[in-house]
């Protein structure tokens, strides 16, 4: 095939054949296509889109470009969960043990944080001894013995997607529904799941800025899932402010534990229970309970000790440490370095969540690029959120670092200014935020 003909075909809005897409993905994976030609086709896709068939073929060919994890002989219906990312997103460490409390067995492959979004791998590594790099040959034992495995993604999982993602990042071709949807779904399909529940975040702290755009992405991924033979459900959730009361690694894992003993933030509880309910239903473990009754049962098991018991099983099974009181042992201790106070009296109208996420990265809680060092104790604790009424001088949030901070005092005050600029105030209370906006494909 002549790849220039393929570029021109998509440039003029024509539909690519399965063979042309396979040729494209193979050339990406084995580096036989030059970056400038690949980038040209990516831009043509951004401008002219893809049909459902094209998206699905691209997804499957990317999934098949590396290792395909086969979980078919492990017994039971494997349900995977994926989030499109956000600030303060500690959903996975809560959802997996909650689902286990219903008898849902899960193999979860997860990633590290990059940019303003935190990664589950980094959060779980905040527990001393926790092994996030599980060899796939050990999945079966942990799956059978504990019912849960959470592991970092293997480097050979959908390698063509990694190449395309790195090019999209530097060629202005990130914001494309077909490319985002196929990227996400290729990794989920390569991971071996039978069904997929997607947490599609929207708002200032998400890649999809509006509910409408989030629904568009969710619909595309559901259509890909259906054509690929994987039942897929999407939960649209709010990321127009940080989720919960913390962002950071140790801080968020401490909040996970607080949630499991009944002291969690309501928005976290709501998001976790809605996502868990869909996973439980898809796995056929809802015991005849449906709708709001299933959500209520999830709330009960999340906080009555049953999910906590499974959470502890997960920690111990992957080498994590609990102290004599049954509490996780963390690799560092967060120190409250600076309180950020309100400059005026009024209601918090909005929070620019991406700016909060970037501020957290500046504190050392995340990475600008792969290889950057992380301060596990760094992050932000929130004392007031959207809709709360504050007086001048009230504490909005506090900036934290660990025992060996990566930031000096001068930089700390720069971060404080960025955080303050992320808050907008009003004299009247804003419209209340819904943590869960919609469920699609249920």
Image: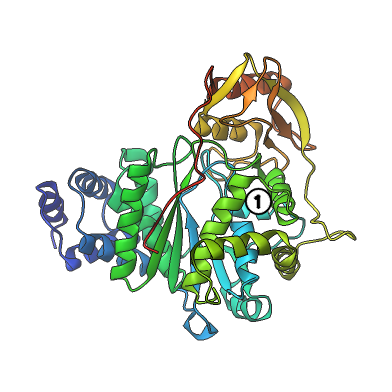
- Where does the image place residue 256, in percent across and percent down from the top left? 69, 52
Q: Nearer the viewer, residue 300 or 197?
A: 300
Q: Can you tell which quarter of the image residue 157 is in?
A: bottom left
The colour scheme of the drawn protein is rainbow
Q: Can residue 67 be seen at all in this image of the molecule?
A: no
Residue drawn at x 59%, y 30% is 359
Residue at image point 50% right, 86% down: 73
Left or right: residue 56 compared with residue 103: left
Toward the viewer: 53 or 348?
A: 348
Secondary-structure class at tag 1: helix
Give the mark count. Answer: 1
Residue 251 lies left or right of residue 324; in this view the side is left
Q: Residues within 10 Å of mark 1 (few under 14, many from 20)?
A: many
Q: Nearer the viewer, residue 28 or 145?
A: 145
**x then y, percent, for residue 259:** 70, 52
For the view shown, which residue lies furthest in the front direction? 293
Residue farthest to the right, as pictured: 324
Q: Quadrant of the C terminus?
A: bottom left
Residue lying at 65% horizontally and 70% vertically, measured from the top left: 101
């Amino acid at each position: 095939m002549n790849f220039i003909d393929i570029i021109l075909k998509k440039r003029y809005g024509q539909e690519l054949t399965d063979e042309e897409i396979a040729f494209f993905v193979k050339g990406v994976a084995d580096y036989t296509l030059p970056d400038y030609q690949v980038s040209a086709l990516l831009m043509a896709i951004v401008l002219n889109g893809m049909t459902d068939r094209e998206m699905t073929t691209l997804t499957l060919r990317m999934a098949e470009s590396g290792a395909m994890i086969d979980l078919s002989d492990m017994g039971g219906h494997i349900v995977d969960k994926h989030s499109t990312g956000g600030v303060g997103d500690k959903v996975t460490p809560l959802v997996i043990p909650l689902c286990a409390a219903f008898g849902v067995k899960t193999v979860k492959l997860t990633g590290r944080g990059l940019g303003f979004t935190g990664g589950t791998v980094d959060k779980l590594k905040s527990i001393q001894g926790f092994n996030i790099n599980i060899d796939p040959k050990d999945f079966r034992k942990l799956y059978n013995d504990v019912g849960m495995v959470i592991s970092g993604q293997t480097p050979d999982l959908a390698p063509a997607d990694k190449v395309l993602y790195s090019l999209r990042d530097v060629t202005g071709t990130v914001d494309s529904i077909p490319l985002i949807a196929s990227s996400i779904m290729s990794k989920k399909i390569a991971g071996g799941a039978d069904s997929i529940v997607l947490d599609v975040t929207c708002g200032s702290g998400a890649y999809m800025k509006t509910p409408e755009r989030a629904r568009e992405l969710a619909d595309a991924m559901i259509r890909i899932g259906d054509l690929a033979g994987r039942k897929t459900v999407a939960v649209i959730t709010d990321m127009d402010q940080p989720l919960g009361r913390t962002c950071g690694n140790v801080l968020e894992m401490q909040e996970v534990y607080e949630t499991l003993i009944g002291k969690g933030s309501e928005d976290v509880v709501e998001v976790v229970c809605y996502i868990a309910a869909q996973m439980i239903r898809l796995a056929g473990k809802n015991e005849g309970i449906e709708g709001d009754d299933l959500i209520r049962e999830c709330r009960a098991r999340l906080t009555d000790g049953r999910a906590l018991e499974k959470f502890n099983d997960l920690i111990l099974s992957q080498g994590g440490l609990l102290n004599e009181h049954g509490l996780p042992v963390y690799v560092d201790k967060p120190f409250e370095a600076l309180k950020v106070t309100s400059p005026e009296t009024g209601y918090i109208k909005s929070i620019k969540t991406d700016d909060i996420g970037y501020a957290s990265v500046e504190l050392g809680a995340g990475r600008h690029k792969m290889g950057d060092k992380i301060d596990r104790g760094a992050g932000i604790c929130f004392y007031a959120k959207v809709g709360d009424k504050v007086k001048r001088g009230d504490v909005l949030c506090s900036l934290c670092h660990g025992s060996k901070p990566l930031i000096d005092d001068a930089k700390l005050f720069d971060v404080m200014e960025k955080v303050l600029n992320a808050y907008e105030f009003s004299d009247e209370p804003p419209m209340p935020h819904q943590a869960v906006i919609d469920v699609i494909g249920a």
